[in-house]
Amino acid sequence: MREIVRRVVVAICLYGGIALCLTPARDLFQIEPVDWLREVGERQQHSENIKGMMSKYVGEEQVKDIDLASKTRGKIADYIAYETEGRLIVVSGTSWEGLWNDIEETVTDKAPSKAWAAVRGLEYHSNAVYLPRTAPLFQQVNAQWPDQSLLAYIRIDPEDSKIAPRYLSVYEPSPSDLRDAAPTHILYPHRTYGALILFGGLLFYIFLPRARPTESGVFYLARAAGWLPDLLAAFGSGAFFAMPFLITSDSSGGPLDRDWWPLTVIMWSIGAIFASIFVITAWYQTRRLTWDDNGICIETWGFTRRNFPLDEIEGIGSYIQQMPQWLRVLAWVISIFNWRATTSAILLDQADPGFSISLSNGTRYSFTGQGLWGANSLVAWCDAHNIPVEPAVRPLMESKPDFQPSKAGRVVSIIFAVIALVGTGWPLMHVAVGAMPQPEPKFRSGSFDAQEDFGQLPSESKQPVAPPVDQPLAASKPPVTVTPEMLAAEQEIIQQIQKVRDEIKTLKSQIGTVANPNEAAIDKSLEAVSRLRELQKQLEAVRSGKLPEKSSVNAK
């Protein structure tokens, strides 16, 4: 019975531990304080870098009027409104101000506590923190989350109207986004428990005492019928059970998502084939044959006992365990077309000789010879009670002596236990420690610092964003009255500009190298840049109040 309990507990620990180790967190927010001034500067610098790269191919004169960061050249309030349009959530209160302060301190290497430092992103994502969206403070964010969007902006209006509002960008990351960005204990919150469960199952398998072998009887030894098959069952079924978790790690539904059911069913079905080895080994480990002067007793599964008196035993004959003939023939047919299957065909064609006990009611109980002990005493008992034994099977049974505990067997058991503990237990402990859960950071109340220069200028400020150093300040102009015709013309020109930019991106990969230039692609790039410069002039004219002619707007 204990062999069944051993394998049931191991199977539960194996599959439960793998599921806990590989199930990622799915309700997380990636939150980053927004520094609009820095973002504007980075976009403008990026535009200059792109122009510098293009000038090497098309010349500085062709790209000097191109501006890929035109949206950042106006007032910063207009740029903020453009970026947050349709994705803005407005909040206020000391709890939100305190949250912003804690996040800002965390991403600037001044975390208020170890708990806040533990939720900071890794490497290139160190400017963000990862918090559960189930936190009470985020209920308002969840209720107002924009439809069909993974990104939202939170504007925190301070209680002091003299202080500028602060902004947080909130992103719904996918599991693939989190893999390289979030700490392990956040990405896999249950991994430590899963590793401990796996290690506990290993300890239970090794240290649960085995039943003491009987002095007389027929049974199978654990080393031959248990350890190696159990090892194959654990690794084979565990690998195929884990595969759907690994393959679907980039999706939000996991292996049980409807779109992944076919894959999951196939993988877990193959894993079930390997897991059936647990059942087979448990059956062998609990199968015993004992006898006395009244007859024999066959025990199966540790709790099913069947007694047969002497007058019901007809004799002992030969038995050969072999794969079905159709399967062996199929394996050889496959090996004709694929020589790699020859090894499998040879293995399937092998046989395991043994013996069978025939009863008067026509029932036969068979025992294979591999790993069998005690059959020699059974032959002696049959001879003493005049039970016929076939001559063909007698040499096989006489070659299976009674089991005698030896130091060599104990040494092998200890070596197996040490290898299992070191080879599997040490990595599991390393995983458990690396993903150790951390305390949740506490959300504190607070207020914005009036002297804090992180973020953006007050929304009522009229100060424009500073242009690049080498670009002169534009002279102030009287306000222009915007008409529907101007908006329509502006939208049409912007769409054409986007098409030309996409064309330039495509041509950039076709220009070639300095040693082997593509003249046709270079000419097309020059032409596209000219069209882009002309469209930008038209856009500036429209924004200044001059409507272009219909033919010029639709040109090319």
Image (cartoon, grey):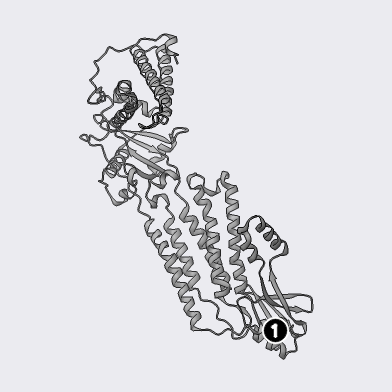
CA neighbours of label 1 inside 10 A, class few (<14), some (14 to 19), many (20+): some
Check the image and name the residue furthest to the top: 549
Q: In which quarter of the image is residue 278?
A: bottom right
Q: In which quarter of the image is residue 43?
A: top left
Q: Which amino acid does label 1 sit on?
A: Arg
* Residue 298, position as x, y percentages in the image: 67, 78
Above or below 56: residue 297: below
| Image quadrant where one finds the N terminus | bottom right
- Residue positioned most to the front: 515
Kindly identify which residue carries mark 1.
394
Asked if residue 132 is positioned above or below residue 162 in the image, the reply reads: below
Q: Nearer the viewer, residue 397 or 94?
A: 397
Identity of the residue furthest to the right in this view: 361
Can residue 158 be seen from the camera position used here? no
User: 319 or 129, which lies in front?
Assistant: 319
* Rendered view: 484 above or below 156: above
Is residue 490 found left or right of 300 in the rendered image?
A: left
How far across and how far down the image is residue 197, in percent? Answer: 46, 62
Q: Is mark 1 on a helix, strand or loop?
A: helix
Identify which residue, 331 or 339, lies in the foreground: 339
**The C terminus, quarter of image:** top left
How far across and down, in percent of the image, does residue 538 sit?
Answer: 37, 14
Residue at the image position 51 percent from the left and 51 percent from the top = 245
Residue 241 seen by the camera:
yes
Residue located 44% across and 59% down the image: 193
Of the pair 147 and 383, the residue shown nearer to us: 383
Residue 143 picture quarter? top left
